[in-house]
């Protein structure tokens, strides 16, 4: 499968008129969104406004009833599981929990996805790649530790490292700083910037942490009740007079 179709043209994700319901509950309402290569887009919004559902739609984990989602020019809502799985190899998805395998060391957690997704790499290449990625997230010293021995921030770093070994073109972060103290949270935000520069990833970051948004965003959208209510950079959004938006800047 050719991932990059001719119309893709540096546009990595294009969402058009997306509407999604859970039963009677409309959770996404007329979402239109474009994301260019190398961009870091932050989706800011209160709890329950549809942020996670939106990024799950982008990887085909949820399906929307109406609208179109193109990823690298492929209409993902029309793709079967086989094609979707192939596309997903280019997309790193960091869920809220991080989800490391508890019975494996940090190193084994990184080697595990490589076994399945990079069978052509020999042992030496795999080990070098794992060391390199662990080094870039600042976890080289923790490679033989078990997840239970890691702090919250280290777990997030390990989760990110596990995504990075597969060299994703897009990374979707769902609330990467939630549950961390402000100092650790800032470290994760800075790591996200570093990763973007080093690996040239395009990313979408969902958060309600304004400090994280400010640190990481090239561009932001604000969602409320399933809708995009504002778009812009930090300074532009700061000027808008709206109760919900103002709430994030207080
Ligand atoms: N699997 C599901 N089944 C039914 N309702 C869901 C499901 N997942 C999410 N929702 C509802 O969709 C809305 C948006 O949820 P979500 O995207 O998780 O919010 P958040 O912005 O906090 O990430 C909420 O009202 C939530 O209850
Ligand atoms: Mg969520």
Image (tube, rainbow, N blue to C red):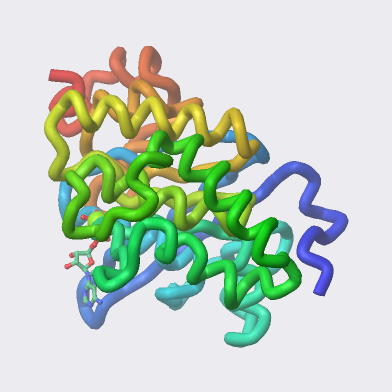
x then y, percent, for residue 116 = 59, 77
Residue 5: image quadrant is bottom right
Give the answer, above or below, for where 209 lies relative to 168.
above
For this rendering, which residue is in front, 157 or 181?
A: 157
Residue 143 on image: x %, y %: 38, 50
Compared across the picture, whether 39 is left or right of 224 comes to right
The reply, left or right, for residue 89 in relation to residue 142 is right
In this rendering, the answer to whether 191 lies above or below 77 is: above
At horizontal 23% and vertical 19% (from top left) the residue drawn is 241
- The residue depicted at 30 percent of the width and 39 percent of the height is 44
The answer to whether 195 appears left or right of 160 in the picture is right
Quarter containing the C terminus: top left
- Of residue 209 and residue 188, the one placed in the foreground of this image is 188
On the rendering, which quadrant does ligand 2 occupy? Answer: bottom left
Q: Examine the rendering and report whether any part of residue 53 can be seen.
A: yes
Q: Residue at x 82, y 54 (%)?
A: 7
* Residue 78 x/y as whole percent: 63, 80
Question: Which residue shows up at 47% across the image and 28% down it?
Answer: 193
Using the rendered image of the protein, determine whether residue 71 is visible from the camera's viewpoint: no
Task: State the image quarter where residue 179 is shown.
Answer: top left
């Amino acid at each position: 499968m050719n991932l990059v179709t001719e119309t893709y043209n540096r546009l990595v994700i294009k969402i058009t008129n997306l509407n999604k319901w859970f039963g009677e509950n409309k959770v996404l309402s007329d979402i239109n969104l474009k994301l260019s290569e190398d961009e870091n887009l932050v989706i800011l919004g209160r709890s329950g406004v549809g942020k996670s559902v939106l990024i799950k739609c982008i990887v085909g984990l949820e399906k929307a009833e109406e609208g179109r989602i193109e990823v690298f020019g492929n209409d993902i809502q029309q793709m079967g599981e086989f094609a979707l799985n192939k596309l997903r190899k280019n997309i790193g998805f960091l869920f809220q929990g991080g989800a490391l395998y508890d019975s494996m060391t940090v190193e084994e957690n990184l080697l595990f996805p490589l076994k399945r997704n990079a069978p052509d790499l020999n042992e030496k290449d795999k080990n070098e790649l794992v060391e390199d990625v662990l080094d870039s997230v600042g976890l080289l010293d923790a490679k033989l530790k078990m997840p239970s021995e890691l702090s919250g921030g280290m777990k997030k770093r390990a989760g990110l490292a596990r995504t990075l070994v597969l060299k994703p073109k897009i990374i979707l972060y769902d609330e990467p700083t939630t549950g961390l103290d402000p100092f650790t949270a800032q470290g994760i935000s800075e790591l996200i910037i570093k990763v973007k520069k080093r690996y040239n990833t395009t990313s979408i970051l969902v958060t309600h942490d304004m400090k994280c948004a400010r640190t990481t965003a090239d561009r932001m959208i604000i969602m409320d009740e399933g809708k995009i209510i504002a778009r812009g950079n930090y300074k532009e959004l700061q000027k808008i007079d709206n109760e919900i938006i103002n709430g994030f800047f207080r």
